[in-house]
Image (cartoon, coloured by chain):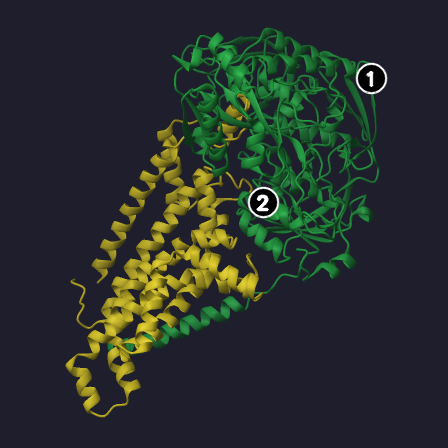
Amino acid sequence: MAATLRLMFPWIALCGMLAAGVWAFSFQSLPPADFTFANSTEIESTDPAIVTGAPEGRVIYSIYEALLGFDPETLEASTEFGVAESWEVSDDLTVYTFKLRDEACWTNGETTAPIIAEDFAWSWMRMLHPETAAQYAYQLYYIKNASKFNTGQVEVGDPVEVELYDRPIPTQTFPRGTILHGECVSIETQENSEDAIYTIQTDEGEKRFIKNENPSEGVTAARNILFDFQHVGVKALNEKTLEITLNYPTPFFPKLMAFYPLSPVNRESIEKHGYPGFTKPENLVNNGPYRISFRRLRDRIRLVKNKHYWRRDKVELEIVDILAVENTQTSLNLYLTGELDWSPDVPVTMIPTLLERYQDLEYKAFNPQPFLGCYYYMLNTTHEALQKEKVRRALNLALNKEEIVSRITGAGEVAAYSYVPPGIAGYERAFCEQYNPEKAKELLAEAGYPNAQGFPVIEIMYNTHEAHRSIAETIQAQWKRTLGINVRLANQEWGSYLDTRRNLEYNVARAAWIGDYVDPNTFLDMFVTDGENNQTGWSNKQYDQYIEEATREKDAKKRMEILHQAEILLMKEMPIIPIYYYVDKNIVQPYVTGFYRNLQDVHPVQFLGIDKEKKARFTNSEIR
Amino acid sequence: MTQFILRRLVWMALTLWAVFTISFILMKSVPGGPYSSERALSPEIQKNFEARYGLDKPLIEQYFDQLTYAITFDLGMSTRLKDFTVNEVIAQGLPISATLGVIALSFALILGLTTGVLSALGRGTFTDVFFMSIATVGIAIPNFVIASITIILFVFLWQLFPAAGWGSASHLILPAFALGAPYAAYIARLTRTGMLEVLSQDYIRTARAKGLPTYQVVYRHALQGAILPVVSYLGPAIAGVLTGSVVIERIFSIPGLGSHFIDAALQRDYTLAMSLVLVYTTLLYTMNFLVDLSYTFLDPRVKIPS
């Protein structure tokens, strides 16, 4: 037996290999897509409420449609595209009334159902619900009482909603258990428990609740005790009318309504399939231009046009593949062999070659344009030397930013002298001082460090990346050359770097900010005292006041002026040193139509198309 | 025999537990979390997030929770690919990595055995020197360099294969070649050494003296002895092909376990990364175990003590 097996072994092995070969080669090839693009990474989820990144945005914009849409070129919010066909705003700019269009509908691919105003109220309730844990929940904080509902704060006198411990599916947040409404009468904290007992006046009289499954005698178990969502500023007046009440006039609110995380989701489907069941292509009920045909993890999401979408006639591409290619060199290879029509990123090392390659051609496949993003250094204002304004200004004056953008970054980035990037209509930027070595030295001397005597060694901290290192090295050399100060470099892996920054354990740290919406506020409001993203220890009462005033200001022009004043202050005291504004790194085939290089670098697929005639001409030509 | 298998299984369980514990500690001691982002979250939102993913519990509780999950083969939800359970991710990735691995290994075996035997038979000739020089180079060059070279040659210079992706047979060729090449080289050297040793044995001389044709001597008598080192190398090779595909999968954008593993570790996908470590451990252990078992069939000199 053993001997036979021994003799047979090579044959068995050979057969095994042949079988494997036949199996591998029997794969069905997919039918080709009309349009394929690289999406940088596998997305976290297709649930609009819980995602935050640009790759997720590209998918969500394709399968869902928010209340408003935006023009792909100007980014202006518009009723030409979204679920709403018109909107009105009250005189004090705090109450918006949206009228939904009749044609907009939900679909499961077969049947349709109308979208009603209540869908938005429910979707935002779900997004704001603490158990949904939406990272972008704060995008809805402009709505009255939304932050109270999200953070779970309840005070005596507040209207509250109590969810009992009777969820139909205990592992799912939705559908919720029985909800009781009432008013919070008192809150008793207990000695040996974190959970407080809430006394609530309901229709059935006063009752005591605790957020705990096993309450003591006379107390009712509550799953959640939250600020009553009925008192949050979102109301469905009727099936097609949605009223939203804001805390303050918020001029960029319509733009926010076009932002993908705020897209509505289908209540019925979520309550039936739960999360993540409702995200599966076979269960998906959506309202956007595309439906998901299938999703293969870390490979692709295949979209097919939604034949029930109300704007379907304007959507050109039938089948779209979204590839989760992580490596930029790989996506460039795919682009160069014609398998990708668009890649949002290229390898840094290839930028000079690509720029040169497309320099003299009529169509610039690679043509970086500035968008709303700023690369800057943050200074820890609690540091012994960096707490002095003159030192911070000296560091800025000693920086030759032109050298950095021309010699290091190389994709046409623009040296930054303001924190808010250019291009926002109606906003006048405030600038910091330009490169001036003499003045830098003077200021350093005035701050008590003539010729850098007694100046401590400072450290530049950045997250591990080749490009960040080159920039840090250049800055290290410039500061040494101009000011004579000694600078150390330290790189940290992403997670550690964020922790170090947050805990103010750095001297100087590399940072970047990409605007959430086209308004200076998205850049400026982060530097208020103790803002989560301030992270410099800087605090200025006047600045806080400017931001607060701007929030309350009704007049758009005056508001911009106040924000301008705030930026003047920021650029004078310099808790941060702007270095350059980002440019996009899209590379797009010449035959792609409807692609605009805009301020937010967003390019919803529904506006893209392919010029077939041109494509036929370009295939296999050297233009690629 | 049964005792041997049982003992090995107990050791496997212990190994898995140790690997699980060590990687859990390592994973949790690295700063950052699955929600790490340039946009800092307000403490309230962060609290909601941690509660949803059970990250607010004491570490020891998280440890036992996860251990229970692992034992019951319910590996939980991925913390990063939020719409999927870890089991779904592995179910999608494992067949892909396995396909790539099998093709790479078949290729390595066919090429390695053939060139090894030819080299041994023509010892000292040009063929021998030629094959063995290539093999030496093949062992020395890491697979991602081979991958880059094949891309330059067969994607850009001669447009024969797609640059990356997954879905058809033509997508398989380059990655399987790049992945299998170093193993082919190693197998070639092993086969040659084994053959040379066996060919100098008395029983081979006897076989030749009986007047058997060369191919019969090689196939019936020599190869069986010579192949033993190759077989014992297969265990580590299979494990190596499966774990070594990490870089190759990234270069060719192949959605296998390797890609999942890198991303899970970088993105602090605790549940997925932990589970993949366990999957890899199981694979390695099982492969070595099977090789040990196969010895009893292939080599009459090996007896498992009972």
Check contact, mark 2 vs mark 1: CB within 8 A. Answer: no
**Relative to A82, is B87 above or below?**
below
Q: Position of residue A163 (x, y in %)?
A: 59, 23
- Callout 1: SS: loop
User: Which quadrant of the view contains residue A147?
Assistant: top right
Work out whether residue B152 can be spotted: yes
What amino acid type is highlighted by mark number 1?
Answer: Ser
Vertical order, B254 against B220 (above or below): above
Q: Relative to B81, say whether A564 is above or below.
A: above
Q: Secondary structure at mark 2?
A: helix
Compared across the picture, whether B4 is left or right of B80 comes to left
Q: Residue at x 59, y 8 (%)?
A: A156
Which disc is residue A33 wearing?
Answer: none
Q: Residue furthest front?
A: A438
Q: Which x, y percent locates residue A391?
A: 49, 13
Query: Numbered disc 2: what chain?
Result: A
According to the picture, the residue beneath numbered tag 1 turns out to be A90
In the image, is residue B94 above or below residue A537? below
Mark 1 chain: A
The residue that disc 2 covers is A352
Chain A representation colour: green
Of residues A257 and A167, the one drawn nearer to the viewer in this rendering: A257
Colour in which chain B is drawn: yellow
